[in-house]
Image: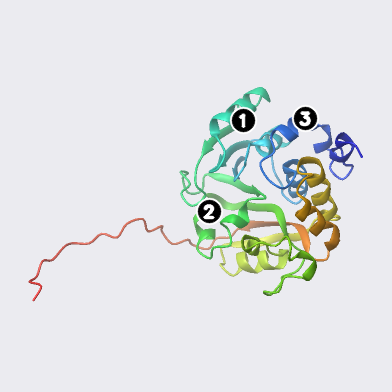
């Protein structure tokens, strides 16, 4: 099938209206950011004018989509990709009044507590969000009842330390950051800071994963072979959506104040 045919997938009617050449020029990772964002928003009640943090936005394709399709204001935030290049893409898309690019570390975000109505993360959250200490630092940026939502590569089921034979040639140690919807729900809800409203896998998600790689990375033979062999048994596109609860979040400790009290060493 031609590239245009693959990217104009009936499963994602909004995404299918975007120019495939524009989408490919904004590639920043191993997943189609429009497909994942559209699927995530099916479970995410966005309203026009909301303030949204797009965390780990890559080259801001998802941020532009969120603003154009849902009328939200988006802070397109990424550590690895240039905010200056993202600004050019945002300007060319005609959304400079609603998408604001910046470069920042997910662990050192420069925003006020309670500033955002929603935080989304497209195929990025596992890089930092598996840390037991990370969730409070990001949830504090949400208003009461604010939304946290992620979508990206993951697992249909947890592996419990054993990689299936058909995935071993492709699997690398960093892939242990991938998890199942049930894992994300447990990981988030045990904190008491959020209540999960959705946690599932994309229908035919492994096929969509494979379709995307055939378009943007046809030479990535190992991953393509792994996806073909897996047939959705282990690998999946995963999403999770949660609301902030009323639980208090401890203040962030950035320095410990001490007073030096001199004494003889011996």
Q: Position of residue 119 (x, y in %)?
A: 61, 48
Q: Quadrant of residue 158?
A: bottom right
CA distance separating discs 1 and 3: 23 Å
Q: Position of residue 70 (x, y in %)?
A: 72, 37
Task: Choose between 140 and 56: the one closer to the eye.
Answer: 56
Binning the other alpha carbons within 10 Å of mark 3 as few (below 14), some (14 to 19) or many (20 upward) gives few
Q: Quadrant of residue 186?
A: bottom right
- Of the two numbered discs 3 and 2 on the same chain, state the one appearing first in sequence: 3
Q: Is residue 29 above or below residue 239?
A: above
Task: Choose between 68 and 61: the one closer to the eye.
Answer: 61
Quadrant where the image shows the N terminus: top right
CA distance separating discs 1 and 2: 22 Å
- Residue that badge 2 annotates: 138
Q: Nearer the viewer, mark 3 or mark 2?
A: 3
Per the image, label 1 sits on a secondary structure element best described as loop
Count the numbered circles shown: 3
- Residue that badge 1 annotates: 98
CA distance separating discs 3 and 2: 34 Å
Per the image, label 3 sits on a secondary structure element best described as helix
Q: Are marks 3 and 2 in contact (CB under 8 Å)?
A: no
- Residue that badge 3 annotates: 21
């Amino acid at each position: 099938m031609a590239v245009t045919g693959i990217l104009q997938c009936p499963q994602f009617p909004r995404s299918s209206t975007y120019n495939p050449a524009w989408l490919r020029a904004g590639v920043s990772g191993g997943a189609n950011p429009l497909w994942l964002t559209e699927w995530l928003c099916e479970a995410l009640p966005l309203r026009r004018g909301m303030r949204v943090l797009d965390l780990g936005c890559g080259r801001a394709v998802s941020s532009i989509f969120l603003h154009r399709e849902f009328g939200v204001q988006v802070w397109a935030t990424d550590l690895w990709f240039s905010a200056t290049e993202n600004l050019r893409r945002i300007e060319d898309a005609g959304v400079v009044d609603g998408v604001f690019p910046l470069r920042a570390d997910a662990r050192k975000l420069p925003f006020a507590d309670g500033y955002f109505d929603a935080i989304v993360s497209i195929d990025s959250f596992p890089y930092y969000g598996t840390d037991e200490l990370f969730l409070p630092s990001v949830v504090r940026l949400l208003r009461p009842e604010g939304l946290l939502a992620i979508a990206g590569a993951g697992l249909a089921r947890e592996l419990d330390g054993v990689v299936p034979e058909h995935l071993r040639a492709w699997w690398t140690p960093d892939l242990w950051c991938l998890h199942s919807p049930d894992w994300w729900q447990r990981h988030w809800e045990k904190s008491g800071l959020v209540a999960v409203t959705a946690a599932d896998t994309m229908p035919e998600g492994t096929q969509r994963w494979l379709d995307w790689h055939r378009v943007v990375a046809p030479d990535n033979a190992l991953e393509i072979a792994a996806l073909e062999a897996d047939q959705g048994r282990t690998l999946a596109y995963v999403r999770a959506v949660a609301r902030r609860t009323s639980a208090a979040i401890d203040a962030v400790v950035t320095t410990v104040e001490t007073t030096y009290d001199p004494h003889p060493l011996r």
